[in-house]
Image (tube, rainbow, N blue to C red):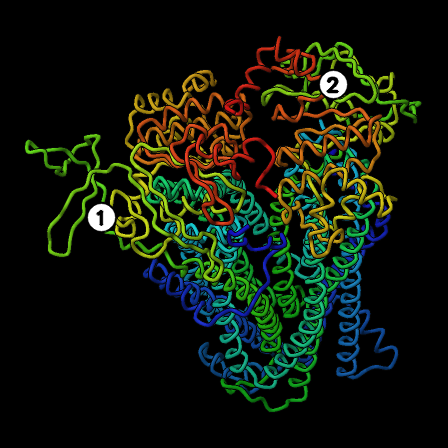
């Protein structure tokens, strides 16, 4: 319920359409129910006037009125009735078409608002929020889930209004026309209703279960496709085939079970329609004759047949809508999860808009990713870095090197202690100001589809071409960019698939340099760059941006060995700190890494 | 990159519909029929019966109402001297004069006509019962047939896929391959379970109703046809317009979703660069465009139904009006039955026109679904028609032992000794012990014919030697190993394994003799134990644990919550890269092959973890011929031979020390003044 209320608020400026649509649908339904009603009178009128007898005509007053206006001939009256009917049909057409138009506007608008809100929410998410949802699940929520909810919304304001109304009006009309004869619906409707409920109650849980199995089956196919080299190397094609056959047959059996239950639907529906027809033929005909068509006339017979169809069809639709809405309710709640998520990192009340310098201080920092996590990712970190220094960080995977640097631009907030930049707690800055001053080249970095220039300008929208080239020269990227036929206008494919790993890294560095940051952090950003170029980049940085504090995370000792300070991280704690020579002397881990990487080079 | 390019990624929403090849439909039917002969025939008959049962009742209804009208005539003195009425009266010993002289009481009239009504209703009930039973049988059988059919198709596809050469997987994206199992199977399901039955139902209903209409009146039939024509024209006009906008909507949707994907995946970068506002702005634009296109497309779709429905209503009015005119004016009727127009006939037409138009629009709706379904079926058949990996090898791998004379003979049991069983043209069979001696002679190779990626590669790997390949991405390192295990084939005789031309060795046996550890570790859903056992399906738990110990994987596996029974899912994403690699090494260890290929096995592992993995690898390499591809030189220094590859040529070869002395590329590489990835 809360979900629905929440989502309903996104109808926003399309409220008028969202209300008009069901109103118009109701009018359409009324027209559609009046048409058989009038037709019944028309038929009875023709039939009885031909046989020179009285018939049950509910709109006799209209005929009297027409006669009063001098329309006496039967043909004239028939003509007027037909005229009325055509007007009704045209009205119904108009209402229906208008309802369709308003419904389109409302549902597409609703989806638009929902998407915008979701996208904006996700853009405001902190790293912590993003980790929680994972990118792929966020994408699904923004695409498939929105589409599902949009479909349901469309159903609700149109079909879900139409079916119950159709049901009610048809029942009313059936009683007006058929009198006692309409009692057959009192018997048949509950039968159908009960059967439909029973069938869906039985089948739905199986379906839910089997859809999960089906997903798993597809998951295993994907696994197989991805691991095809392994499958073929170990000659496990048949083994995989066996495994797959078993799983696939399992899915089949469950589907068959569910669908066999569902297969009752259409015979039950037919049974009901047939029952209406048979009882009309059997009882209705008797009623017409015994009352000499005063209580029930031939026209009524025809009308009841039409209403019977409408009543049963609307029930059928209702059960379908019910299933579809239940299915999309999961999408709805997934969307609401995103909307309800509060970003964990917000601007302070009176933010500071100026970062003085590139000093960095970690004051007894403890940090863990999730509140519930038992272990701290970083523990007891005490660090004081002066503006302009070059810092190297080294350590094994899982030693929390990336966690450490992500605290500086406040991508995550510390759990305990504080991180200061320029002598002020990072939580006091305006986030934008802070992140403009602290430029991070992330380990898992991405380029976006667009030209190289466009990608670089992420760093500074107003950068001149000269500035772009300057940054690229610093990052040793200018040379290879110029070797491309389109140079700086070379189009980068989504995910940067058309440049090599090393090129991508250098472009990312150039992009970060363009921010002219006070602190520059390279998180394993030169791993695919050769050692010589790596050295060139470091040299350029040392000479060209001496005032910028540089933090370099690396695997290679050579990348950090000339840093002012090298920090050894091990299991979230600082294991050693000092320059190359000191560490070589005192730190075991450092020595171990150093020897493993340079063994043999000393041969000469 | 010299490797064949993958197809560009398809937009996420559906693939373009091209013209469906002829024969696809008959192929689907043929498959269906061959799997389920009897059920298929039964379903067809049952669908036909239930369609007939739905279409015929107009006849019964008309007959009942005619009886009713007769009865009313009897009551109200207005009996026409129709033979039918006279007959009815005569059967009760009455004559026309009885009527004209005062009419019957309603009850008497009822008594006269009721037997006739009753017999009609009984016939009706019979027809309905047949219809119901048929419908019941066909819907239930259909559930079995559809799901069984899909299951068989899935299995056929999967089996086929397993037989395809690696080349196929190198040249098709995973997404495209997956889409056979998801999208295409789904359209096939629609086709078989819905479209085909509905088309049969609709066609039979249309034909039946058409004849029933003609049975009653040609004039009225023409009127209904006129109405159908109007509906078809209108829906074609609106539907055609809608299709144009629908495509636009799909394009806009694809664009928007593509953007969402890119931005969300790169979101951490967005945050780092304070790019949120720009990305929101761009999204706003795309979203607005999508909304606009979707609204128009939906407008068409949403107005189509009410318009068609209400044209139906107008047709309904016309039927009543024209029908009544025909009755009132006594226009001579033309019909199969020779019946005059009457009010009951007009009422029957009301129902029939609805049935007729409904089924016609059903048919046109399904036509679209059929085309979509066939397009899906065609893609599936494309996969099935792909050429399987050919294997003309006849040299097989067998367990062997030495007899008392020191001759190598075949053995039933596992002996730990393997031999190549080589049947010759003259009927003799020779056995060669598997040693792991691999030689390549002047191999040239290209994935595509005119683009040679390997030039003149010769190498000799003696049993137990460690051969390393060094070089830039795309230099051809992996390509060489692709040739050794025959993922790709080259001309005869250029590669020899224990002196045997590898093209003569059965592929499955060749690969069984080669172990492989790749950079990207692929584990399969199942327990850790299952994953290790993948290397040798009949390995005991002890053997697996033993292998894990050798691979240095035992200690961390023991620390997992469920030890060897820990379930690995999602390619083992809960494990670290190093741990996954260790499991894959254990997997290779349990297979115990004479030759190992390590393709960048330690590349994505940091140096400290690498030490651990290296120890595992070293144990694995003991006593085997090993081909190592590595980025990091520290891992290959102790190789017997190091080959430096550049653009598909071996430019330097020799031991680590030799190469350093040569002061060539390898020396530069090693001293860090040069890197291949340029």
Residue shown at the point (56%, 55%) measured from the top left: B7
Residue B655 pos. (x, y %): 41, 33
Identify the secondary structure beneath mark 1.
loop
In this view, the residue in front, A198 or A547, is A547
The residue under label 1 is B395
Q: Is residue A151 above or below residue B208?
A: above
Q: Chain of mark 2?
A: A
**Between tags 1 and 2, which lies in front?**
2
- Pick the front one: A153 or B434: B434
Secondary structure beneath dot 2 equals loop
User: Does A125 sit above or below residue A91?
Assistant: above
Q: Residue at x 74, y 15 (%)?
A: A415
Is residue A208 something one can see in this rendering?
Answer: yes
Is residue B144 visible in this depiction of the protein? no
Check disc 2 and report the residue beneath it: A564
Callout 1 touching callout 2 (CB < 8 Å)? no
The image quarter in which residue A475 lies: top right
């Amino acid at each position: 319920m809360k979900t629905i209320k929440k989502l309903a608020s996104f109808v926003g400026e399309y409220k008028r359409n969202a209300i008009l649509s069901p109103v118009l649908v109701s009018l359409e339904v009324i027209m559609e129910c009046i048409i058989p009603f009038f037709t019944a009178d028309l038929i009875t009128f023709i039939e009885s006037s031909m046989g020179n007898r009285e018939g049950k005509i509910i709109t006799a007053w209209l005929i009297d009125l027409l006669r009063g206006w001098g329309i006496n001939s039967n043909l004239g009256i028939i003509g007027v009735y037909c005229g009325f009917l055509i007007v009704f049909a045209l009205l119904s057409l108009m209402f229906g078409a208008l309802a369709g138009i308003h419904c389109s506007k409302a549902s597409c608008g609703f989806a638009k608002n929902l998407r915008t809100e979701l996208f904006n929410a996700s853009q405001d998410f902190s790293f912590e929020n993003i980790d929680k949802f994972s990118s792929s699940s966020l994408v699904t929520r923004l695409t498939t889930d929105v589409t599902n909810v949009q479909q349901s919304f469309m159903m609700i304001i149109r079909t879900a209004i139409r079916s119950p109304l159709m049901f009610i009006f048809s029942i009313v009309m059936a009683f007006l026309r058929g009198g006692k004869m309409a009692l057959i619906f009192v018997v048949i409707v509950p039968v159908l209703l009960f059967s439909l409920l029973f069938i869906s109650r039985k089948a739905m849980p199986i379906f839910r279960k089997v859809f999960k199995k089906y997903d798993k089956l597809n998951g295993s196919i994907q696994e197989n496709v991805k691991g095809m080299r392994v499958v073929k190397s170990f000659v496990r094609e048949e083994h995989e085939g066996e495994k797959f056959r078993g799983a696939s047959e399992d899915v089949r059996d469950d589907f068959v079970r569910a669908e066999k239950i569902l297969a009752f639907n259409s015979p039950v529906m037919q049974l009901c329609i047939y029952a209406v027809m048979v009882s009309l033929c059997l009882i209705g005909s008797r009623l017409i004759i015994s009352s000499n068509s005063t209580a029930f006339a031939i026209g009524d017979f025809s009308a009841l047949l039409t209403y019977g169809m409408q009543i049963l069809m609307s029930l059928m639709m209702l059960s379908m809508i019910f299933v579809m809405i239940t299915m999309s309710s999961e999408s709805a709640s997934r969307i609401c999860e995103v909307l309800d998520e509060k970003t964990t990192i917000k601007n302070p009340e009176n933010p500071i808009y100026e970062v003085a310098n590139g000093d960095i201080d970690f004051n007894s920092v403890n940090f863990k990713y999730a509140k519930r996590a038992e272990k701290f990712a970083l523990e007891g970190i005490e660090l004081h870095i002066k503006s302009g220094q070059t810092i190297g960080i080294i350590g094994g995977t899982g030693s929390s090197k990336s966690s450490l640097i992500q605290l500086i631009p406040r991508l995550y907030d510390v759990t305990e202690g504080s991180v200061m930049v320029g002598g002020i707690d990072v939580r006091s800055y305006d986030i934008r100001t802070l992140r403009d001053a602290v430029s991070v080249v992330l380990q898992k970095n991405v380029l976006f589809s667009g030209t190289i220039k466009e990608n670089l300008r992420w760093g500074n929208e107003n950068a001149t071409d000269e500035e772009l080239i300057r940054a690229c020269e610093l990052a040793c990227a200018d040379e290879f960019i110029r070797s491309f036929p389109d140079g700086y206008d070379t189009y980068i494919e989504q995910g940067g698939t058309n440049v090599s790993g090393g090129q991508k890294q250098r472009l990312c560095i150039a992009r970060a340099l363009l921010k002219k940051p006070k602190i520059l952090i390279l998180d394993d950003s030169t791993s695919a760059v050769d050692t010589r170029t790596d050295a060139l980049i470091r040299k350029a940085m040392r000479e060209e941006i001496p005032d910028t504090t540089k933090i370099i995370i690396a695997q290679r000792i050579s990348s950090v060995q000339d840093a002012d300070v090298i920090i050894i991280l091990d299991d979230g704690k600082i294991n050693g700190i000092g320059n190359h020579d000191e560490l070589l002397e005192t730190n075991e881990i450092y020595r171990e890494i150093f020897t493993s990487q340079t063994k043999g080079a000393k041969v000469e | 990159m010299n490797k064949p390019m993958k197809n560009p990624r398809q937009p996420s929403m559906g693939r373009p519909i091209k013209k469906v090849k002829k024969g696809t439909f008959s192929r689907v039917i043929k498959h269906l029929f061959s799997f389920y002969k009897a059920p298929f025939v039964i379903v067809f008959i049952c669908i036909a019966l239930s369609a007939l049962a739905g279409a015929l009742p107009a006849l019964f209804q008309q007959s009942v109402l005619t009886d009713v009208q007769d009865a009313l005539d009897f009551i109200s003195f207005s009996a026409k001297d129709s033979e039918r009425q006279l007959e009815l009266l005569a059967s009760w010993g009455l004559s026309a004069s009885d009527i004209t002289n005062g009419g019957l009481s309603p009850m008497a009239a009822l008594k006269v006509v009721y037997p006739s009504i009753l017999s009609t209703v009984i016939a009706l009930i019979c027809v309905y019962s047949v219809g119901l039973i048929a419908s019941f049988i066909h819907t239930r059988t259909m559930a079995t047939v559809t799901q069984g059919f899909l299951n068989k198709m899935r299995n056929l596809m999967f089996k086929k896929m397993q037989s395809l050469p690696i080349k196929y997987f190198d040249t098709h994206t995973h997404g495209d391959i997956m889409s056979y199992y998801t999208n295409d199977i789904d359209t096939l399901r629609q086709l078989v379970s819905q479209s085909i039955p509905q088309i049969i139902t609709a066609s039979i209903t249309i034909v039946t109703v058409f004849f029933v209409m003609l049975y009653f009146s040609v004039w009225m039939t023409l009127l209904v046809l006129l109405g159908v024509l109007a509906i078809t024209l209108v829906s074609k006009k609106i539907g055609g317009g809608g299709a144009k906008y629908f495509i636009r909507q799909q394009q806009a949707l694809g664009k928007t979703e593509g953007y969402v994907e890119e931005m969300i995946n790169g979101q951490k970068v967005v945050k780092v660069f304070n790019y949120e506002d720009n990305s929101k702005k761009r999204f706003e634009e795309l979203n607005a465009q999508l909304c606009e296109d979707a609204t128009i497309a939906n407008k068409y779709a949403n107005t189509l139904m009410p318009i068609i429905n209400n044209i139906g209503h107008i047709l309904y009015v016309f039927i009543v009006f024209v029908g009544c005119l025909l009755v009132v004016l006594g226009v001579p009727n033309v019909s199969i039955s020779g019946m005059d127009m009457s009010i009951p006939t007009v009422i029957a037409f009301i129902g029939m026109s609805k049935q007729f138009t409904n089924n016609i629009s059903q048919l046109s709706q399904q036509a679209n679904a059929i085309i979509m379904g066939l397009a899906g079926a065609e893609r599936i058949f494309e996969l099935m028609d792909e050429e399987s990996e050919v294997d003309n090898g006849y040299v097989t791998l067998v367990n062997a032992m030495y007899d008392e004379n020191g001759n190598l003979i075949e053995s039933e049991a596992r002996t730990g000794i393997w031999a190549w069983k080589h049947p010759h043209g003259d009927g003799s069979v020779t056995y060669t012990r598997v040693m792991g001696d691999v030689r390549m002679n002047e191999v040239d190779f290209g994935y595509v014919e005119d683009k040679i990626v390997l030039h003149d590669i010769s190498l000799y790997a003696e049993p137990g030697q460690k051969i390393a390949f060094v070089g830039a991405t795309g230099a051809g390192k992996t390509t060489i190993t692709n040739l050794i295990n025959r993922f790709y084939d080259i001309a005869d005789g250029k590669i020899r394994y224990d002196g045997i031309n590898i093209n003569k060795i059965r592929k499955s046996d060749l690969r069984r003799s080669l172990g492989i550890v790749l950079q990207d570790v692929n584990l399969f859903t199942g327990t850790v134990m299952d994953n290790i056992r993948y290397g040798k399906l009949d390995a005991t738990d002890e053997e697996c644990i033993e292998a894990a110990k050798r691979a240095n994987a035992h200690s961390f596996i023991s620390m997992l919550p469920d030890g060897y029974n820990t379930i690995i899912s999602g390619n083992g994403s809960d494990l670290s890269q190093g741990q996954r690699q260790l499991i894959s090494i254990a997997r290779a260890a349990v297979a115990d092959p004479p030759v190992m290929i390590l393709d960048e096995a330690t590349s994505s592992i940091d140096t400290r973890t690498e030490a651990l993995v290296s120890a595992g690898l070293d144990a694995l390499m003991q006593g085997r011929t090993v081909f190592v591809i590595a980025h990091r030189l520290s891992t290959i220094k102790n190789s017997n031979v190091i080959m430096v590859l550049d653009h598909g040529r071996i430019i330097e070869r020799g031991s680590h020390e030799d190469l350093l002395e040569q002061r060539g590329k390898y020396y530069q590489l090693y001293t860090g003044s040069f890197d291949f990835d340029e």
